Every structure is written in C-alpha cells, then in structure tokens.
Amino acid sequence: MDMAGNLVAMLLGIGSSATLHISQALMRQGMVRLRAGDRRVSQWSLYSLGLVLNFTAPLWVLAANLFADTLWFTSMFATGMVALLLFSRLVFHQPITQQQTLGALAIVAGTALIAWAGMLGSTGARTAFGLPLLMTASLVWVLVMPLAGLLSRPLALPKQEALFGIAAGGFLALDALWKSLAQQRLDGSVGLLPDSMEAWVYFSISFLGAGSAFLMMQWSYWRHCRATGVVVGYNLMYVTLPLTLAGVVTLLQGQIPWNPLIMAGLVLMVVGAMVSQRR
C-alpha cells in the first residue's frame, strides 16, 4: 500500500462522492415534485437520472479497492457535500445558510487532514477488520436503524435528517467494507471480483448495505427531509464508521488506533456536522 495507491483511491473517492451527492439532489427533487402531483416526463426523468448516478456506487468502490485500503476511499466522501451545496444552489436555487457553509468547510477540512495522513502512507497494510466485527456492526445497523426511523416521526425535521443520514451513511460504509473483504485473495492480493464461494457470499451481502442505504435515503425524502440536511450525517458516518472499526482492531492489537492527523480530522468533521445542523 504505497502513497500512489492511496492517492488513486482518494481521487476515486472524490469522484464517487461528487456523483453520489448530486444524485441525491436529483432524486430528492424528483420525488418531491412527483409527490406534489407533477407527473410530467421531465420529473420522472429527473428522478431516473439521479437513480442511475446513485447506482454507480459499487463501481467506484470496486475500482478503489484495487489500489488501496477502503479507508482512503471512504475518507474522501465528505468532499461531495460542497458539490451538493453548489449544485442545489445553482440548479435548484435552494438557499445555503451560513451554518451549512461553515459546517461544510469544517467537514472538508477534516477530510483534508485524513487525506494528508493517507498521502504520508500512515498505514502499511490493508486493515483486517475481521468477519466477527463486521458482522456485529452490520447486525446492529440492520436491527437498530429501521426501528429508529419508525420512531423518529414525531421529531423535528433537522433531527430526522440527522438520523436518516447517519443510518444511510452507515449502510453504505458497510457496503464498501464487505466489498473490500470479498475482493481480497488468500495470497494477500486484491482482485476486481471475488475468486471463491465464500468471497461471493460477502460480495452479495455488500449489496444489502447499498440497497438499505438507498431505501433509507428515499424514506427520508418521503418525510420531506432536505438532501443538504440528510447528507451531513450521511457523510459523517460513511467516513467515521470504517475508521472506527479500524481503530477497534488496532486497539485490540495493543496499538494506538489512529495517528494525530486522523484524530484531528474526525474531530473537525464532528464539529462541522454539529454546526451544519444548527438552526
């Protein structure tokens, strides 16, 4: 895992993030208009375009895993928030609040620190998350998040946006981690597609994460949540869940979980998320 590989994975992460964030804006806008009774072909086209862009997510992560640890791909996801804010403002003429701007800047600054750690090659091998830890995290998300979504109906809209974002971001992060596990070979190399029956099972499970992330986002839009509000938690969890699981692994091995750059980046991202959700 060298610096060049980390850089390629991070660039793919930035491209993936911009594409997926814009897809959320398109789907949200299309769903709101369709639900309001506007059933013109243009509105269906708007939603369909977002849908197609959203379904490119597996391709980005499969490609990135060939070059570096999944952590460097997922750590770039918050950069797409800038693309979303600009796209929503320029195309859909939605206002951008000062809190959203400051929060986005803090999140991107945190992402930049994590990227810096990646450029310095702070990890020398792929993170061995381990099947039990990954299964535990997946079961927690599957059992807790849909229930939390059902119980969140009486909450204020910003709180619902945060909840659905965290749920969807976690599901999509689990998708990336299961794919990473499925692509690893017994000899330590990485392939584009699985090479064993066990790996194909992991690969299939990964799509349950991607599908659940998609459904949670659509559910949030049905609740009239704003894309710019939901993606704050979405970004935060997509980046921090893999880093947290990696931290648990290294801690159990008796090592320091993260270097100072990664820890500072995580703190900035949390602060940015809190600022963005202020009203």
Image (tube, helix red, strand yellow):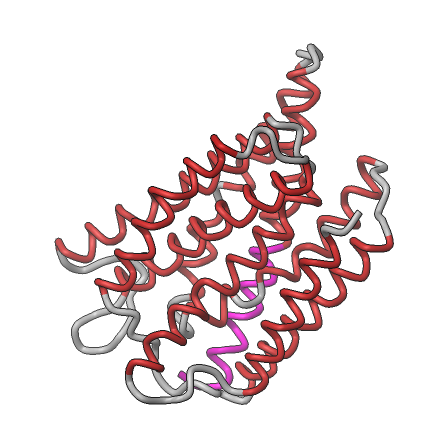
How many circles with numbers are drawn on the protein?
A: 0
Q: Is residue 60 above or below residue 51?
A: below
Q: Is residue 68 left or right of residue 184?
A: right
Say above or below: 110 vs 87.
below
Name the residue: 26% across, 56% down: 135
Q: Position of residue 264 (x, y in %)?
A: 62, 80
Q: In x, y percent, where is residue 49?
A: 60, 33
Position in image of residue 89 (x %, y %): 83, 43
Quadrant of residue 18 within the rendered picture: bottom right
Q: As drawn, which residue projects farthest toward the left?
A: 197
On screen, residue 102 versus residue 182, left or right, reads right
Q: Which residues are magenta?
A: 1-17
- Residue 35 magenta-drawn? no
Residue 224 sits in which quadrant? top right
Give how far across and how far down residue 90 sits, in percent.
84, 43
Q: Residue at x 42, y 50 (%)?
A: 58
Q: Residue at x 72, y 51 (%)?
A: 277
x 58%, y 33%: residue: 220
Question: Residue 11 colored magenta?
Answer: yes
Q: Examine the residues drawn in magenta and state their main secondary structure.
A: helix
Q: Is residue 242 left or right of residue 118?
A: left
Where 261 falls versus 246 (above or below)? below
Q: Nearer the viewer, residue 231 or 83?
A: 231
Q: Quadrant of the N terminus?
A: bottom left
Q: Depth check: give the residue in front, 214 or 154.
A: 154
